[in-house]
Amino acid sequence: MYINKAAWKMMPEEQRAALVDHELCHFTREEWEEPDPKVQSKWVTVYGAATDPDSWGIREHDVEEFSEIIERHGLWDIGIETFAEAVREADHQMTISDVQRKYDHFAILSLFKPHSNAYNMALNLLLSYGPYI
């Protein structure tokens, strides 16, 4: 896992924690259900050995959708519905200052010559970490 140092320096502590948590959620281990050895009528989740590289994998995001599709068709998929419920229950919602900070970061682009390497790098950084800065 890599995190861009420049983006990291611009993030407040809460956003750093959210980013690290987000990235760690991509890690997954092989799992399966087995009868509980203590109570045969119950099942328990068993995980692959942590030391076995083959038991680890990369988990994709729960939801990938365009906002226009949700605007036109609503919460048409169970994954989107589940994600929307998690958003509604979240402890933190964006504030006006969060939005302003995001736009302030995009103002940084005006410091670079359009389409230069530095401009493209800054744009990619902002687009990649936009929710976190």
Image (cartoon, helix red, strand yellow):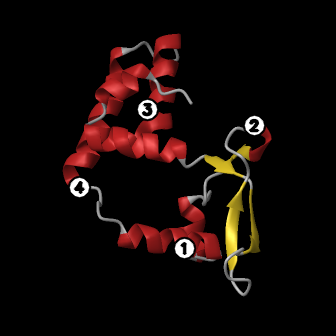
> Judging from the image, what secondary structure is the residue with disc 2 in?
helix
Q: Which residue is mark 4?
A: 95
Task: Measure the C-alpha gap from mark 4 to mark 1.
Answer: 23 Å
- Looking at the rendered structure, the kind of residue marked 2 is Pro
Amino acid type, callout 4: Thr
- Element type at mark 4: loop
N-terminal-most mark, 4 or 1: 1
Q: Which residue is mark 1?
A: 82
Give the residue type at disc 3. Answer: Leu
Image vertical order of residue 7 relative to residue 90, above or below: above
Task: Say how many tags the image has.
Answer: 4
Q: Earlier in the sequence, mark 4 or mark 2?
A: 2
Front position among marks 4 and 2: 2
Q: Which residue is mark 2?
A: 53
Mark 1: amino acid: Thr
In 3D space, how far apart are the residues under numbered discs 3 and 2 (Cα atoms)?
33 Å
66 left or right of 132 in image: right
Depth check, front residue: 93 or 32: 32
Which label's residue is closer to the chain start, 3 or 2? 2
Residue 119, horizontal then vertical, whole percent: 46, 18
